[in-house]
Image: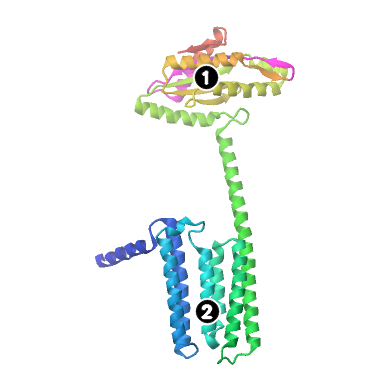
Amino acid sequence: MQAFDFWISRLNRLRDALLGTDRPMRIRTSQAALASVLMFASMADLYLLAWHGLADIRHVVLWSVFCTLGLVLVFGLIRSGFSLRWSDPSLAFGQMLYAIACNAVAFVLAGHGRGISLALMAVILMFGMFGMSMRQVVMVALYAMLLFGVAMLVAMEQALTDEPAVLYAAYFFMLLIVLTSSTILTRRLGLMRAHTRKQKVQLALALKKIQLIATRDELTGTANRRFMLELMREEIQRADRSGATLMVAILDIDYFKRVNDSYGHQAGDRCLQAFARVVQSSIRTTDRLARWGGEEFLILLGDTNFALALACLERVRAQVEQAVVAMGEIEIRITVSIGVTQYQTGDSIEQTIDRADLALYAAKAQGRNQVVSV
């Protein structure tokens, strides 16, 4: 068992050395390695033809050396990270052009077995189409038609060939079928990828909207009650661990029912929105504002003592008092009563909020438009 683990470990190290440990790098090197395997299989096929006298072994050896050098060069550029300097680090387009050139030469060298190169051509196209744009696919198709056209002319001119011209016409027609079908398939894959990307964007937007609905008040854009309760739990736990002070303030718009009764609910909504904007601009970025219900709002002030909290909330009260909500020719002014308390270690959220409520009731009882603490 230990010997087995030892060899597995050695193989994993060898794999990491060849393919890399970075995931994007490993994907690129693995694709290049697979392309190399396909090319070596093609070489073996051509050597088989040469073994049976259908191809010149000297030409096959030169061809295989040329192909191998190209494979080593491409793999080295990718594995070294040098290919990262280009827009296509996987070198898919370049590998396709090189593989097609090698395949066109193999068509000439294979003699009576040259038909196998068309099957290899299909494999090359299927392997490379996923990493190329539609423009690149069209360029590859035209490039392949040109190279194979030249290769067929060269093969027809070979002195020892006894193949009829119609056979080459059939070869070229089959090449057109392979190239056309590959181009159409690539086009369909491109459309599918574009549709998938569009769906992902729409899904992300829908998810973001759902998250906003779950955490935000739709009218004012502030946090909603449920989200604020979760945030308070987290802040209370942090305060218990660190000993930091935590202040909770409840704000209530004075005589808000009169606004609705006098000017309508649309005016009331406008007042709530304006109120939220004024308060949000008057508190610190670290403080959190939530709509607690109706015309009541709650502010959570972290790392703040009573003096700083009262100064901040007094600024809020003054800014609200100075704000004007315009409804056509009508100008609406509002004021706010605020109750604030400090979280005490061991208290529950409900106990802390109850104390803030008591302070708010005291502010209303003392004439409203003021800040009271308990």
Q: Is 143 a magenta residue?
A: no
Secondary structure at numbered mark 1: strand
Location of residue 365 in the rendering, given as x and y in whole percent from the top left corner: 55, 8
Question: Which of the numbered marks, if any, corresponds to residue 362?
Answer: none
| Left or right position of 19 against 266 | left
Per the image, the residue denoted by label 1 is 250
Look at the picture and state if 335 lies above or below 201: above
Secondary structure at numbered mark 2: helix
Location of residue 124 in the rendering, given as x and y in whole percent from the top left corner: 53, 71
Query: Which residue is found at the position 42% from the left and 20% from the top?
Result: 304
Q: CA distance from mark 2 to mark 1?
A: 82 Å
Per the image, the residue denoted by label 2 is 105
Specify the quadrant that holds the N terminus.
Answer: bottom left
Location of residue 90 in the rendering, given as x and y in whole percent from the top left corner: 48, 61
In this view, the residue farthest toward the right is 329
Amino acid found under the numbered disc labelled 1: Ile
Query: Which residue is found at the position 54% from the left and 73% from the top?
Result: 100
Res 172 → quadrant: bottom right
Q: Is 335 a magenta residue?
A: yes
Amino acid found under the numbered disc labelled 2: Val
Specify the quadrant that holds the C terminus.
Answer: top left
Which residues make up the magenta segment? 328-357
Report crowding for label 2: few under 14, some 14 to 19, many 20 or more residues within 10 A (C-alpha): many
Query: Which residue is found at the position 57% from the left and 74% from the top?
Result: 122
For this rendering, which residue is in front, 214 or 44? 44
